[in-house]
Amino acid sequence: MAEILSALRSLMASHSPPLHALIVPSEDYHQSEYVSDRDKRREFVSGFTGSAGLALITKDEARLWTDGRYFLQAMQQLSDQWQLMRIGEDPSVDSWISDNLPREAAIGVDPWCVSVDTAQRWERAFAKNQQKLIQTSSNLVDEVWKNQPPAETNPVIVHPLEFAGRSVAEKLKDLREKLAIERARGIIITALDEVAWLYNIRGSDVSYCPVVHAFAIVTLNSAFLYVDKRKVSSKVSSSIQENGIEVREYGAVSSDVALLASNQLDKDTGLSSGRNDVCETGTCEAEENNNDLIWVDPASCCYALFSKLDAKKMLLQQSPLALAKALKNPVELDGLRNAHIRDGAAVVQYLVWLDKQMQEIYGASGYFLEGKGASKKRSETMKLTEVTASDKLEGFRATKEHFRGLSFPTISSVGPNAAVIHYSPQPETCAELDPDSIYLFDSGAQYLDGTTDITRTVHFGKPSEHEKACYTSVLKGHIALGNARFPNGTNGHALDILARIPLWRYGLDYRHGTGHGIGSYLNVHEGPHLISFRPQARNVPLQASMTVTDEPGYYADGNFGIRLENVLVIKEADTEFNFGDKGRDTYHLSISLGHHIR
């Protein structure tokens, strides 16, 4: 680690201009939460493996910012050369830089790995002391990463209509109608799951996420997919082109954004039939001459592409695909239910197997048959670990129809490890299961018809009174949120409190959000909505046909952790009254996709 920091500081000093600091974000070129091995630059420089965090390297210091899910993990993984900065408790990275680096300091970042929103926020903070954000022409981490993994070249797969529920033509038609309404002539789509959803394609470029490293540009007349062409078979290429989409090399997005900015992209390609009859009313053609904006989502578009556009002719607004993707169609909802039925069966099989193993190997009283095995002696030759147990769970899932892999690394955690919210067990260091300690497992799978995410917390012996009280409080919060009815326009920030009140009565709480959207054979964490105490949960009201998790918890550092999680579907609910004309649009978190074990 010391050698890496030294090499980076040398590059910072020789950079033009010399850099006083280098920011290394977690994100890739698409601002993804989960990234491929090649893009784990922040992990490479810091040693911290959590999915969320940001590293800052100065001439004399190295600091890492992360959120409450990862405080314990970061403390365990960071060397003494690094200082942990707790988001929400310590100053933000831009505030710290503004207050601690000299006037006119130069702060470097790869503009491909930072969003427009974030870069502009930093620039505003740095301006107070005439500090400048410098866009490096290359990624300095890549220059010192000698054994950086190669770029993924996995095949692009067409996602069948029987699982997608809506055709590419329908989605493009809806998108172009939104462009016309907003007086935009084109949109740059950078989020990997949005590209996959719009074009009904899937891939395996990122572990646990069935996405392809790709960009998209859609105009009123044309549509483009930017992807490594080695990943696209002739059959897949034909399917994509049938929808009026031109396949271009991944790296061509940079020059094409510049062409888009100068209104030359459609003329350059000669394409005029890409609408595929999606503007049947003629609205798009009629509006084309009046529409001169380029739609960019500032939360997901990288600063490198944004910098090629005319700031006066941009529509900086959340992508219209974010909400469209979150509102599941009937086929997607049916697929989600079916996937959870199979997934629930796998988890029940696992719990029954695990209960039997805990009795036979450890003499535990057992979860289902309490007291029956208490007289047995612990085996001296056999043992279960967090990893071998989670491998068995994956094995049960792998037998189910349409299984395509896990949706995130399984959190299989015993006792103190369960207090590490996003704990990742490793074969060399993981703990052995213990009949006298709480066991928490948070896991999920990718199926062709749906994505799952479920957490259960169990004890195979005799939990303490405090453990039982904490578990009961978490369960009460979980049920309270799952039974919630709320009027039209309610957001997840308003509902988050329902899951916490039972814990607050005892002075307890948890440092993570309570719920997130979930994709349809896509990312396990999906926006734009969420249920959380964080301010961004106010941005998007919850609506019927959205999916959301319900996962309150409690974590006693160094002792135990508890979390319960199901996936819910929001649906319209009938109410006796109609106060303020909102009753007819009252929603209900009513359909629990999961299963309950005593």
Image (cartoon, helix red, strand yellow):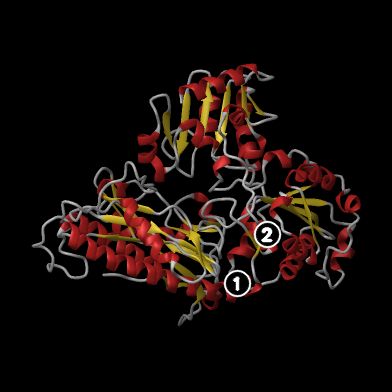
The mark lying in front, picked from 2 and 1, is: 1
Q: Which tag, 2 or 1, sits closer to the chain's start?
A: 1
Numbered label tally: 2
User: Counting other residues with Cα less than 10 Å from the Cα at mark 1, is it few (<14), some (14-19), or many (20 or more)?
Assistant: some
Question: Which amino acid does the dot numbered 2 rest on?
Answer: Pro
Image point (43%, 74%), residue name = 341
Q: Which residue is mark 2?
A: 320
Give the spatial CA distance, label 2 vs label 1. Answer: 22 Å
- Is residue 189 visible to the viewer in this orientation of the structure? no
Question: Of helix, strand and loop, which one carries label 2?
Answer: helix
Image point (68%, 62%), residue name = 198
Q: Position of residue 563 (x, y in %)?
A: 33, 57
Image point (51%, 25%), residue name = 4
State if disc 1 and disc 2 touch (CB < 8 Å): no
Instruction: Choose top left, top right, bottom left or bottom right for residue 466.
Output: bottom left
Q: Which residue is mark 1?
A: 163
> Does residue 119 appear to the left or right of 277 in the view shown?
left
Q: Position of residue 216 (x, y in %)?
A: 73, 53
Q: Position of residue 483 (x, y in %)?
A: 39, 71
- Image height of 442 relative to 397, above or below: above
